[in-house]
Image (cartoon, grey):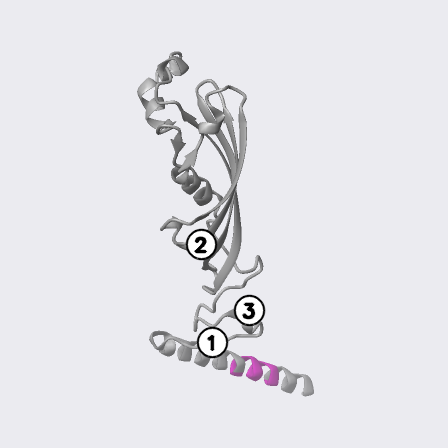
Amino acid sequence: MFDTRELGRRPGALKRVSRTVEAPKDLGIEVIGVPEGATIELDLRLESVMEGVLVTGTARAPLSGECVRCLEPLGQQCEADFQEMFSYPDADDRSLFKDTGDDAEEEEDMLFLEGDLFDLEPVLRDAVVLSLPLQPVCDPDCPGLCSECGARLADDPEHQHNEAVDIRWAALQELAETIQDGEKDDVNGAASGADEKQEK
């Protein structure tokens, strides 16, 4: 919770805050996120306005996850910017939205000060999650894993497999090879016949 009492409801009053907090649980997506308990650095600007307190800030945090191509662990840094209005509990909120026709929906999305305090976690969670890469990779050129054996291709750029024949297709391949051999014999026989004619 952050305290706004020093601003005192004086429009234009300004306060800057720098603080480190511990990351809450499940701050991230399936493949990457901020580890629970990791240090998040916050730089905040609190500005008193007529309706409440406008909070503008930046959050910096370490990320932990895995490359979506080769599944290797990776560590990155996250920087997320955000801005949110925390309204006074007794503010005439409906007057702010009287022309929109969406009073109930707008008010439901609003955040309010509790006394002179506000909880930044919902805003922080949204900002950090939206800043995360949906497809994190250890390297932009990561080639991923071998589709046959699962080997990491970055460790062995020359990695390859001899073509293995599916047993279900073995008989067909043998037939194809027999036909190819027969065609070669026919071609060789025709060539020999042509040579004999030329000699005559």
Q: Amino acid at mark 1?
A: Glu
Please name the residue shown 47% across and 67% down the image.
145
> In this rendering, is residue 122 above or below 87?
below
List the residue tagged with mark 1.
163
Disc 3, SS: helix
Quadrant in which the N terminus is drawn = top left
Whether residue 189 appears in magenta in the rendering, the answer is yes
Q: Farthest residue to the left: give it.
A: 104
In front: mark 2 or mark 3? 2
Q: CA distance from mark 1 to mark 2?
A: 48 Å
List the residue tagged with mark 2.
38
Whether residue 132 appears in magenta in the rendering, the answer is no
The first of marks 1 and 2 along the sequence is 2
List the residue tagged with mark 3.
154
| Magenta segment boundaries in residue numbering | 185-192
Disc 2, SS: loop
Please name the residue shown 40% across and 78% down the image.
175
The first of marks 3 and 1 along the sequence is 3
Disc 1, SS: loop
Residue 41 location (% of width, % of height) = 51, 46
